[in-house]
Image: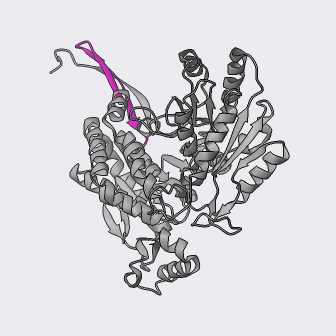
Amino acid sequence: MYPAYIGGKDVEHPTGRYVHTVTARAILEDTFASLRLKRDLDDGVVDPRSAADRVAGGCTLADEEMMEQALAAAAAAAPAWARTPLDTRVEMGRQIGKRLRAHREEIVEVLVAEGQPRSLAGPCIDEYWIADFSDETLTWCAEQMHFERDDGRRRSIVRRVPDGVVCVNPPQNASTPNALFGITAMLAGNTVVVRTPRSVPLATTYVLREIVVPVLDEFQAPPGTLNVLCAPPTMDTWLASPHVNDIVYVGSTTKGLAFEQQAIAAGKKPILELAGNDCCVVWRDADLDGAVRALTETFRQSGQICNIPNQVVAHPAIADELLDRLVRAAREVRPGYPDEPGVVLTPALMADAFFANISDAVSKGAVLVHGGRRLEVDGTASDTGFFLEPTVLRVDGLHHARSLTAVRDETFSPLLPVVVPAPGPDDQLLDDVLAFVNENKYGLRNSLWSDDLSVLERAASTVTNCGVLNLNDSHSGFLPFLPTHGGTGLTGGAFGEANYLMLRTSRLQGVDFVRPSGHTPS
C-alpha cells in the first residue's frame, strides 16, 4: 500500500482514500464480484486484508493540492540537482538498470497481478526496460551532453543544460516502461513528477518506489528530485503551473496533437509519444520463419501497444505462403489468465473500432483470412468475451490500400492487414513499396526482411519516416544504444523525432571561458 511520494516523503490524502488493484485473474474469474470488491475497497467499506487473495495492493489517490505540492517540491529541488555532476547522474542511471535486473522476479509478479502476461513481463524487462539504462545508451548520451576544447587560455564548451521540471503521464496500456523512460529526464539534471494512471497505478508505483527511490537516496539526490502520485487527469494543472517546463504526453494522436498546441501556448515544451502504424515489408527472398515471428508480435497485449507491426507489405511471389504461415501462427495465439505460460493476449474492452476496421476492409475488397471474433478466457467464441481473436486480412493492390482504415490508421488491436502488390519488375516494385512505407502519416518504426544485401541497403538509405528501422530482426524489440521511443509525423507531432529523453528534456548552451592572465589549466 503506497502513499504518494512528494518531496522525499510519504504523503497520505487527508481522507485516507486509496485506489486498489484487484488481481487480473480475479477479475477474469468473476468480473462482477471483483468490480464490486474494488468499489467497496476504494470506498473504504472493506478492509483489503480481508481479501488479500484477490487484492495486489493500493495507492493513495492524490488530489490537486497534493499535485501542487509535488510540483513545488520538484521546482525547489531543481537547482541543486542540476548542479550534480553529469558523471554522477549517469552512474545513477547504471545503478537503476542493475537494480531492475536484480529485482526482476518481484517486478514480474506485480505486473502479472495487474494484468501483464507472465510470458511478456520478464522479456520486456530484459529487453525493453533495461535499454534506456544500458552502459551503451548512457555513455552515448553523456557524450552528447558535454563537449569542450581547451587551448590553455580559452576553454570552449558546448553542453546540454536541463530544462527544469519535467512532468510525465505514462499510459495505462504500458505504464511502467513509459514511466521508466520518463524518469531518464533526471539523468539530464531535471527533476520529475510522475502521475501514475488511476486504472493501473500499482506496478509503476512499485518500480519507482522500490527500485528508483533507493538509488536516489544512495546518491543523496535532493528531496523532490522524483515525485510519484496516483491522480486524476492533471494536464490543466501542469499547463497552468509556473513550475513546469516540459510535459511528456503519451496517448492518442488526436488528443496529443491538440495538447501540443495547448502546451506551446502555455510556454511548455511538449514531448509527444503518440500512436504508431508501423509497416513491415517481407521481400521475395525473406527468411519467412523469422518474418512470421516478428509479425506475430502484433498480437502481443492484443495489439494494444504502439511499437508493433500494424501492416505488412508482402512480395507477391511469397504472399500466399506467408499468409498460410501467419494463419497457422495466429491459431496458436490463445487467450488465458496472465499467470499462465504462453499467454500473450490481454482483455480488450474497447472493441468497436476493431470490428469497424474489419467491416470497412471487407467492404472495400479485402479478404478476412482468419479471426474477427470475440473470445472467452478459455478460447471459445462469444459475443461478450473480453478477448479479441488474432485476425489476418489480405488486401490486394498497393495503391488503394490506404483507403482502408485498417491500413491507414493505427488500429490498436490484434488486427494485421497483409497488403499484396500486383506483380511487376522487382526494381520498380521495390521503389513502389519503399515509397508506400515513406508515405505513412505515422513514423514510429518500420522493418524489412530480405536475404538480398542490396535490397536491405536500399531500404536503409530510402526509408526515413520512422524513428527506428529494423532489418531482418524483431520489429518491436529495443536494443541498447538505439533510441527506444520517438518518431515523426502523427507519432511525435511537429517536433517529433527518435531520441533519448536526456536529450529531449535539455537544450544546447555554449560557454566561452577565457582565463585571466597568468592562469593556466590545473
**Looking at the magenta stretch, what is its main secondary structure?**
strand
- Placement of the C terminus among the 4 image quadrants: top left
Range of the magenta residues? 146-163
Q: Nearer the viewer, residue 464 or 148?
A: 464
Relative to 391, is 117 above or below?
A: below
Image position, residue 334 (x, y; %): 56, 57
Q: Is residue 38 visible?
A: yes
- Is residue 152 on the magenta stretch? yes
Image position, residue 116 (x, y; %): 47, 59
- Is residue 80 on the magenta stretch? no
Q: Nearer the viewer, residue 379 or 410?
A: 379
Relative to 280, is 3 above or below?
A: below
Image position, residue 17 (x, y; %): 45, 77
Q: How many marks?
A: 0
Relative to 461, is 137 above or below?
A: below
Image position, residue 318 (x, y; %): 66, 29
For image coordinates 45% across by 62% down, the residue present is 340
Q: Nearer the viewer, residue 212 or 105?
A: 105
Q: Is residue 61 left or right of residue 511?
A: right
- Placement of the N terminus among the 4 image quadrants: bottom left
For image coordinates 43% across by 76% down, the residue present is 54
